[in-house]
Image (spheres, rainbow, N blue to C red):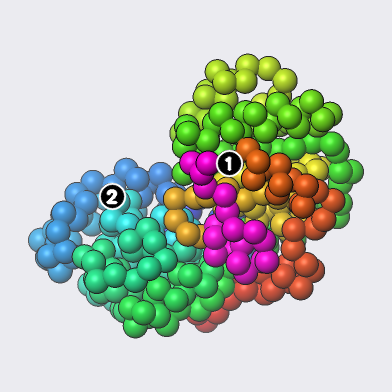
Amino acid sequence: MKNIAFLNDTSDWYHWGCTGTSAAIKEALAARGYNITPVPIKSIYEIKSVPETIADFDNREFFNRFFHENLPVTAPILQNDIVLINGEGTLHGISRVSTVLLYLAYASKQICGKRVQIINHSCYPDDSKQHTQSTASGLYQGVYKLLDFVAVREHYSQGLLKELGIEATLSFDCLPLYIRNHLLTASAERKRTIVVAGSVAWKAKGLEALVAYMRAMLADGYDIKLLTGAKANPALDDKMFLQALKQALPEGWTHVDAPTMDAWLHTIQSASLVVSGRFHYTIAACMLGTPCIVLDSNTPKNRAICEEAGLPEPLPYDIDGLEAALHARTRSALGTSPITSAVREEWLARAQKNFAGLL
């Protein structure tokens, strides 16, 4: 049996899209005969002794302390042959958690001598699609050049890494694999419902325009559902968005806190339209044939998949004329599939490429 440590497992994290993604990765690993030791993302967030300088990456004293103090994360690295890191949306900028993941990748390869791969992710060292000579870019470059395999979810990330001298495989997010393997019904009755969701980049400035749009759609006979839900550790920004919306528009719409992955998918599948700034919500809508309007996120990843899928570029929350833009997008989106069957099949094929570096 081949042994693999699966770091940054998002099964119990943030929202159901993250759960489905990690489930698909673990299913793919099991199908290839791997014995998996998952390391939850919550354990990554709870890490002690975070590297404070780039010099810490090569400091053996720091390594010894770090690995001793963080055994829930580091023991699986030492006990397995391969370290597979689910990068998802974590590897951008120099935050506490991104620095931890970069260090884990570096130490696993450079000091522990493991085979190290980062898959299923978007990579933006400077939170932008523009390449710079920043400290962040230098740190990412130093780590990524050591890795045995890198798979990114969209072409912006691939282009940025290429500018850093890193050859990354163009894959895709693994959520489409989960949808293909687990969706109970091939289609659902499309209801006169608009599903609204938040975004990590949600801004209060856009709330007035969004509420005005919702009022208009309610007056036009649509039901509106605010969709949230997570297996565990739900997104804090979802809670903030929900509270703000309740204050601005106390009634007329329904909050659906999906209790299961199936309920989350069914809510999206049965809607007439999904309005969301969440990467996984957009992917789910596209895979299920539900028309969607894409709002902005905290990195260019939403813009990248819109380009790849032939969708209009994401709408920023803070633009003037947001309400009018939402109505215009609604008129053009309703009743049409957001992506072609060719794009759907391409996403599924690319998702499989996350595992191209495995034996």
Q: Which residues lie in the magenta part?
A: 302-320
Magenta segment: does it hold 103?
A: no
Magenta segment: does it hold 304?
A: yes
**Residue 160 on image: x %, y %:** 40, 73
Q: Is residue 99 visible?
A: yes
What residue is shown at x 71% (from left), y 42% (from top)? Answer: 327
In the picture, the disc for residue 42 is: none
Circle 2 residues within 10 Å: few <14, some 14–19, many ≥20: some
Task: Name the amino acid type tagged 2.
Answer: Arg
Q: Is residue 119 left or right of 325 when viewed as pictured?
A: left
- Relative to 209, residue 52 above or below: below
User: Which quarter of the picture shows residue 228?
Assistant: top right
**Residue 116 on image: x %, y %:** 38, 73
SS at mark 2 in the image: helix
What residue is shown at x 23% (from left), y 46% (from top)? Answer: 48
Q: Which residue is mark 2?
A: 96
> 48 or 4: nearer the eye?
48
Circle 1 residues within 10 Å: few <14, some 14–19, many ≥20: few
Q: Nearer the viewer, mark 2 or mark 1?
A: 1
In the picture, the disc for residue 321 is: 1
What residue is shown at x 82% (from left), y 30% (from top)? Answer: 220
**Residue 34 on image: x %, y %:** 54, 69
What residue is shown at x 53% (from left), y 41% (from top)? Answer: 320
Q: Is residue 265 visible?
A: no
> 252 or 15: nearer the eye?
252
Task: Name the amino acid type tagged 1.
Answer: Gly
